[in-house]
Amino acid sequence: MYNWSAIANKVINGYEINKEEALAILESSDDDILQLMDAAFKIRKYYYGKKVKLNMIISTKTGYCPENCGYCSQSIDSKAPIQKYTMMTKEEILQGARRAHDLNSGTYCIVASGRGPTNRELDIVTSAVKEIKDQFKDMRVCACLGILREGQAEKLKEAGVDRYNHNLNTSKEHHSNITTSHTYDDRVSTVGKVKNAGISPCSGVIVGMKETLEDVYEMGRALKELNADSIPVNFLHAIDGTALEGTDELNPLYCLKVLALFRFMNPTKEIRISGGREVNLRTLQPLGLFAANSIFIGDYLTTDGQERNSDYQMLKDLGFEIDYENIEDREKIEV
């Protein structure tokens, strides 16, 4: 049996866990979950204290995607009955920013479906971001627009985009089982473009897509190599009409082990419990924050999130607090 607390101390002092230790986290006994989460919290508390970063997402363009990602209700192959609409106007994106501001979200995430942004779509986003930065000087803006072409990352940087999200989603080995309309290297390349433009890279995963434990380890290792500043950990919420319809491999305790693994492997990074936390962690959501230090508030792209007051109450019950870093001139929400 591993002494996770002792290993956590080593990680804080610069130790990188090996593959054997990583797989042991995922394979650990359910009876040891509290010991594992206590060790993960030791690392999390060292770097982030008891603060939780809040993020809010807006889907500025939904559906009409030419990609065939098996998890996605917006995929060209999806039969899911979702609302579809083309790119929002600048004013609609600004309205979303106002709501994020009112909810004390530190990061506003502008997301659009599709392989990548057209010049017109990029112009709408950059124009909106410039006004958001003028109106809400303390708000961090993250864009998630797909695969970027040459020069597009620089335009986003110039407009004021702080962070760009482009998830690896799964391991390189498993990628072709999830989508064939773009490659794993296409995703890595976009993260590289973002970093070269001076934008903070955000890249994460979706767990529960019929991957192996080794695939999960490889996801964590790849994100460490990419040096992603923010790592969203999504848990598959299988949607009827998608290629992964009916997939149900996850349980709350395993999800906690995954979050612990990503904290051990990427100790200094923002780990965000993202899509699927409500349906997969269920009543154990609070325990997830002993490893992760970030959540989305509000809804996701095509699925509902937890009611925000429930999230605030969860933080209060845990004795945690909202991370107000870079948030000024706002009425602080007491949790």
Image (tube, rainbow, N blue to C red):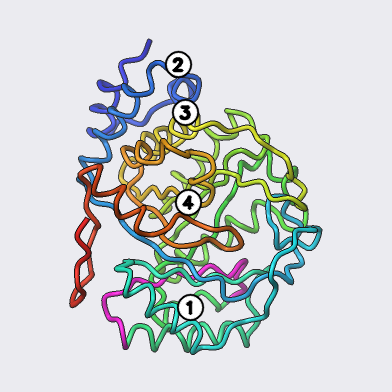
How much space separates mark 4 and mark 2, taking CA atoms? 25 Å
Task: Note whether residue 198 is visible.
Answer: no
Secondary structure under the numbered disc 2 in the rendered image: loop
Where does the magenta region start and end? 135-150
Label 1: which residue?
Answer: 154
For mark 3, does the 10 Å Cα neighbourhood hold few (<14), some (14 to 19), or many (20 or more) residues? some
| Residue at the image position 26 percent from the left and 75 percent from the top | 138
Front disc: 2 or 3: 3
How much space separates mark 2 and mark 3, taking CA atoms? 10 Å
Label 3: which residue?
Answer: 253
Q: Are marks 4 and 2 in contact (CB under 8 Å)?
A: no
Q: Quadrant of the N terminus?
A: top left
For mark 4, does the 10 Å Cα neighbourhood hold few (<14), some (14 to 19), or many (20 or more) residues? many
Secondary structure under the numbered disc 3 in the rendered image: helix
Q: Which quarter of the picture shows residue 329?
A: bottom left
Across and down, in percent, residue 194 comes to 48, 66
How much space separates mark 1 and mark 3, taking CA atoms? 42 Å
Q: Quadrant of the C terminus?
A: bottom left
Label 4: which residue?
Answer: 274
